[in-house]
Amino acid sequence: MVRRSIQAERIELWRGERHVLAGIDLEVGAGEMLQVTGANGSGKTSLLRTLCGLMHLEDGRLLWGGRSVYEDLPAFHSQLVYLGHAPPLKADLTARENLHYWVGIRRSLGAADITAALERVGAAAWGEQPARTLSAGQKRRVALAGVILFAAPLWLLDEPATNLDGEGQRLVGTLIDEQLQCGGVVIVAVHQDLPVRSAEPRRLELSAA
Amino acid sequence: MSTSALQAARLILARDLRLALRKRGQFVQPLAFFAIVTTLFPLSISPDLARLREIASGVLWVAALLASLLALEFLFRDDAHDGTLEQYALSGQSLTWLVFAKTTAHWLLTGVPLALMAPLAGMSLGVPYAALPGIIVPIALGTLVLSLIGAIGAALTLGVRRSGVLLTLLTLPLAVPVLIFGAQATDLAIRGASFAAPLYLLSAMAVLGVTLAPLAASAAVRISLE
Amino acid sequence: MSEFLYMGGYAAFVWPSYALTLVIVALNVIWARRSLDQARADARRRLLRGGATT
Amino acid sequence: MAWTWFHRLGSPPHVYALAARLTPWFAWPAAALILAGLYGGLVLAPPDYQQGDDFRIIYVHAPSAWMSLMVYVTMAVAAAVGLIWRMKVAHAAAASCAAIGASFTIAALATGSLWGRKMWGTYWEWDPRLVSELILLFLFLGYMALRSAIDDLQRADRASALLAVVGVVNVPIIHYSVLWWNSLHQAPSVMKLGKPDMPAAMLAPLLIMLVGFTFLFVYLLLVRLRGEILRRERTASWIREALAE
């Protein structure tokens, strides 16, 4: 059993002439959550994408369970779920189909699993509708159902509460709480604090380079 | 329970085919393009079937090459746009396999229909019935290689504005061998000769393409996500 | 001398070939130096703007 | 221990300084060799018994063609090293190659067509050597177009590097497919290089030119490489040092 913790040591990232991440250090362990804040363009998305191993570090180290993630990227990826600012849904597939194909690439799912997840996020009513017909908030809920379905220990969420109403934002908070109680690790990029109860919200403020 | 690489590839294949069924327009376009281009030749040269037969293999191949290139732009674009490609790269599955599955879906949706339609165009250019297998088989095989090579170009041009012309510029020089052997096979068939030799060479390229191109294309996808 | 320039009747092909190749050689030398000069100027500008780390 | 040279080659300041030091060692020999080769080719070499003085075009055509292929292979090898070891210096070297290669490919095409004019009676004949050269030009142009289409330098480096590697795998396939195509259509080829019975007075200037062009390429590469390294470098103290020279 790997120790669930993600560690970044002095990570550096450049985009052209922009020094996006300048020596960031962080460590988030099991049951802990880190909220990454900062103005637009301060590198929140870049940080999350770097932590998933999509963007390659120029300097520094990135560790999962004490081992460099680059040693075995597929193994690391199977431990995480990343949700970018756009929900990765196909307009021409229904919500259920979207989840079936998206999550199914990693885990075999039954129809009942998808139903349960859609119910959990209050999206059961539009499971059979094409994603095209859903509102931005509804799509966001479907994407959250995907996040649950992956059942991965590490969550990296980029503005998960965007487009959600008050009740939806509370839902995000509850989902994160549940994930933390199961010993999960959560890193979110946010503009405002999420309503999370179970953990001391730790904060990392990025300043625009 | 985790999904095996083969199951994941099958899921992607099924997904792309289903999406194509829902959005038929996109995949009819290359076929219509192929039909129009092959119609333009008789109009610009002569309706004389004997003359057209002389150039039929060239016409069919250039039209098939361009039509299959036209469709390549769609290969990764939508998936890159809505973040699906990112999810593939983070799925923990081998991206090479997933890219191979997508390329196969692309070939089934463009190459195979083109190969099935080419005999019609061939007959309108005066190709004898006996030569029709010499159109279908090489074009099916050739478009497979084109899809594989083109996947590399399509992945490299992701995130580039107005990538269509650039994609053509990158892919066409690499497609020259396919064009040479494919057109030769069809030409031999039209002349009533055996087209086995160029077909073997085409098959050799298909084997090489299947083994190497998805590796390069998946590396290109990763670069585009950086 | 004029016989040399005449090139046994092939002057129209030989001399343009040599001229073109030498022009391309010269252009390459000029372009290479200019590319280095530009990179230096850019680097200087970047230093002044502080777009580099210490 | 054996790998220290490799690591030093990965260090931009080291390579920058090395390139500056090596430049004159390639510039002057290149100039001397090319001048000697020109003199030998234009004056000393006897006219060919079949082609007369027309064959003298070989002394500029063959080195240009040699250069175009050498540059492409160098570019692809540098690109592969850059991709695999994420070595910035290697990407800088690959980026330096494209314009050099494309221009000499154009030279090879133009001199080839001038050379063939008399034999073919036309400036362009679908000679397999020229067709391969033309496709090589397209490969260079594609590489340059891809580089210029991507704004971010690192991504441009990596994407174009992959293209160069894919291209170099395809170059032999393209070449042999063109030869095969040509054997079916029987276009006449006048450009047979390196005939073993070539007299020494003819062969020597050719070899001198080939070596001279190789030195010229290294010189051009070293000059451009310094510029490309500077473009990729962000450590201020280092840049200040490099600019102070």
Image: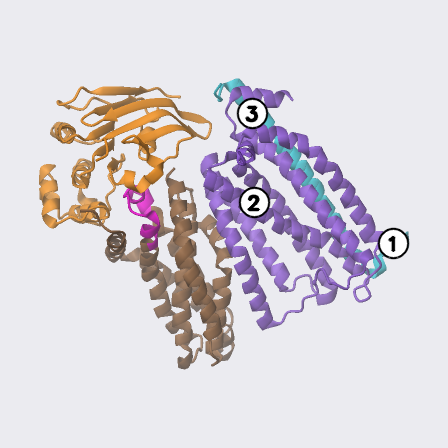
Chain colours: A orange, B brown, C cyan, D purple
Q: Is label 1 or label 2 in front?
A: 2
Mark 1 in CB contact with mark 2 (< 8 angstroms): no
Residue tagged by mark 1?
A: C4
Q: Which amino acid type is shown beneath numbered disc 2?
A: Met
**Residue closest to the eye, D147 or B73:** D147
On whether residue B98 falls in the magenta region, the answer is: yes
Element type where label 3 sits in the image: helix
Q: Position of residue A87 (x, y in %)?
A: 24, 39
Task: Tell me whether marks 1 and 3 sit on the same chain.
Answer: yes
Residue type, mark 3 in image: Ala
Residue D57 falls inside the magenta stretch: no
Mark 2 falls on what kind of element?
Answer: helix
Is residue A54 visible to us here? Answer: no
**Residue range corresponding to the magenta coloring:** B78-100
Chain of residue at mark 3: C
Residue C23 shown left or right of residue D177 in the figure: right
Chain letter for mark 2: D
Distance between the Cα atoms at labels 1 and 3?
A: 50 Å
Q: Is residue C44 above or below residue D159?
A: above
Location of residue B172 with respect to A75 vertically, above or below = below
B115 left or right, relative to A105: right
Q: Amino acid at mark 1?
A: Phe
In this rendering, position of residue D37 left or right of residue D77: right
Q: Position of residue B16 (x, y in %)?
A: 27, 54
Please, is residue B115 above or below residue A1 in the view? below
Disc 3 residue crowd, few under 14, some 14–19, many 20+, Cα 10 Å:
many
- Both marks 1 and 2 on one chain: no
Query: The numbered mark 1 sits on a residue in which chain?
Result: C
Residue B180, can we see it? yes
Let me know if marks 2 and 3 both belong to one chain.
no
Numbered circle sitting on residue C43: 3
Residue holding disc 2: D75
